[in-house]
Amino acid sequence: MKYAVAYYTRSGNTKKVADAIAEVLGVEAFDISKGMTEKADILFLGSSLYAFTYDPSVEKFIQDNASFIGQIVSFSTSASGKSTAKFVKETAEKCNVKFYPHGFKCTGKFGFMNAKHPNEKDLDAARDFAKTVLAELGE
Ligand SMILES: Cc1cc2nc3c(=O)[nH]c(=O)nc-3n(C[C@H](O)[C@H](O)[C@H](O)COP(=O)(O)O)c2cc1C
């Protein structure tokens, strides 16, 4: 099973979570702007909420790289703690990419809100999430 971790970030919050997940999987997380050149059976894909939705570049990344992706596992950060999973799921399904039904989400710093998040506790929860997915989908 080949795992990969990709993220879209504007202020670094989602990258922190991506790096924590990547550490568990033993891979290097990459920015979605790099695109994909190799197949990943399982792609952990991180994004955030901006004005109630995800950034359009995340949608384009899925569309452009669908042939390289076996299944997407979504994770997100946001000020509210809500996730981008439904947007990622919708796009994945349109592109015939399988979508893992459980995701990870945590709060992310936004102005004066959620100072220091994602914090170590959030990152530990992200690591635990990655371990659970590994256990379920196989190493
Ligand atoms: C322009 C803008 C709009 C945002 N809109 C929302 C929003 O609608 N809902 C929400 O929960 N968070 C919102 N946020 C907060 C971000 O989702 C949060 O800071 C997130 O952790 C950013 O992740 P990043 O650093 O990886 O880009 C917004 C942030 C920005 C900069």
Image (cartoon, rainbow, N blue to C red):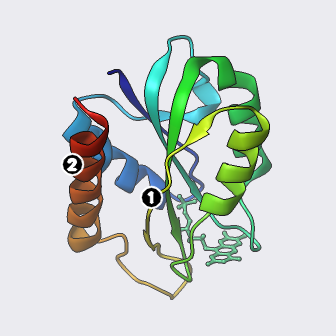
The amino acid type of the residue labelled 2 equals: Lys
Q: Nearer the viewer, mark 2 or mark 1?
A: 1
Between 110 and 85, the residue placed more toward the observer is: 85
Percent from the top left, x then y, of residue 117?
A: 37, 74
Quarter of the image with the C terminus is top left
Residue pictured at 21% horizontal, 72% vertical: 121
The relative height of residue 133 versus residue 12 in the rendered view (above or below) is above
**Residue of label 1:** 102
The relative height of residue 110 versus residue 2 in the rendered view (above or below) is below
Q: Quadrant of ligand 1?
A: bottom right
Percent from the top left, x then y, of residue 84?
A: 62, 62
Residue pictured at 56% horizontal, 25% vertical: 69
Residue pictured at 36% horizontal, 54% vertical: 16
Q: Residue 33 — which label?
A: none
Rendered image quadrant of residue 78 = bottom right
Percent from the top left, x then y, of residue 51?
A: 77, 73
What whole-number distance in Å separates the C-alpha atoms at marks 2 and 1?
A: 13 Å
Percent from the top left, x then y, of residue 12?
A: 47, 56
Rendered image quadrant of residue 137 = top left
> Quick one: SS at disc 1?
loop
Binning the other alpha carbons within 10 Å of mark 1 as few (below 14), some (14 to 19) or many (20 upward) gives: few
User: Would residue 12 be visible to someone looking at this image?
Assistant: no
Quarter of the image with the N terminus is top left
> Quick check: 77 left or right of 59?
left
